[in-house]
Image: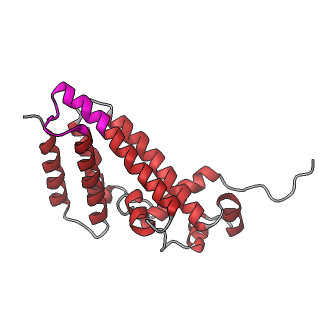
Amino acid sequence: MTRTGRPREFDKDKTLERALELFWSRGYGATSIQDLVDALAVERGSLYGAFGDKRRFYLDAVKLYWDVYERHLTAALDTAPLLPALREILTHPARLDELISDMGVPQGCLIGNTTAELVPGDSEATEIVTRSYRRFTDIATEALRRAQTTGEVTDSATPEAQAQLLLYVVQGLSLVSRAGLDKEAALSAVDAAINSLRAR
């Protein structure tokens, strides 16, 4: 059978990874298709052919972001002692100056940013972020339950409630970080949250 059309001249996975960086640094609304064409050095028609419209491209990038984050979160919390690993997870938004790439500086958590920018108006975006938050609390709950069993973490609250607190802390920090934050104050707040979990 004769092949028609031009073969893709780019790696779809790598292109999505690069688009993720751009969306993360600029946001959905502020990133145009032309911005993507220019930054990724890919023709507009090729982007549409591979990913559909900008919204679909963005949501694919958000899913990729969460897949990578969930793998990192699961691996990080599958350790003992748990509290140092939790501190590392929570301080991530306060260390944005360490995450500079040629696409710019990521602004907070892409899941949180999507919540602020597209939820509740976009039902698919709402589903993605709701599922992501649920996965965060599920993973954290299981880790906290293990740490309560070993006596590292206080059992004055349920692991489920503690995991929900951590979600609020990390998302709050991510949101505030977009406007700039006092890094030392942010780290002190994280330490306060971690200390509240420590068994006495």
- The number of numbered discs placed on residues in the rendered structure image is 0
The foreground one among 67 and 25 is: 67
Instruction: Check the image and name the residue furthest to the right.
Output: 1
Figure check: 131 above or below 105 = above
Residue 32 placement, left or right of 42: left
Q: Residue at x 33, y 37 (%)?
A: 76
Is residue 151 rendered magenta in the image?
yes
At which x and y percent is residue 85? Answer: 26, 39
Image quarter (top left, top right, bottom left or bottom right) of the C terminus: top left
At which x and y percent is residue 184? Answer: 16, 58
| Quarter assignment of residue 144 | top left
At which x and y percent is residue 2? Answer: 92, 51
Q: Residue at x 38, y 37 (%)?
A: 74
Is residue 40 rendered magenta in the image?
no
Q: Residue at x 15, y 41 (%)?
A: 197
> Which residues are the magenta region?
141-159
The foreground one among 7 and 69 is: 69
The foreground one among 159 and 106 is: 159
Q: Residue at x 68, y 67 (%)?
A: 43
Instruction: Check the image and name the residue furthest to the left.
Output: 200
At which x and y percent is residue 149? Answer: 20, 26
Instruction: Check the image and name the residue furthest to the top.
Output: 150
The answer to whether residue 45 of the structure is visible from this angle is: yes
| Quarter assignment of residue 45 | bottom right
Give the color scheme: rainbow, by chain, secondary structure or one colour.
secondary structure
Figure check: 69 above or below 121 = above
The answer to whether residue 18 of the structure is visible from this angle is: no
Residue 105 placement, left or right of 17: left
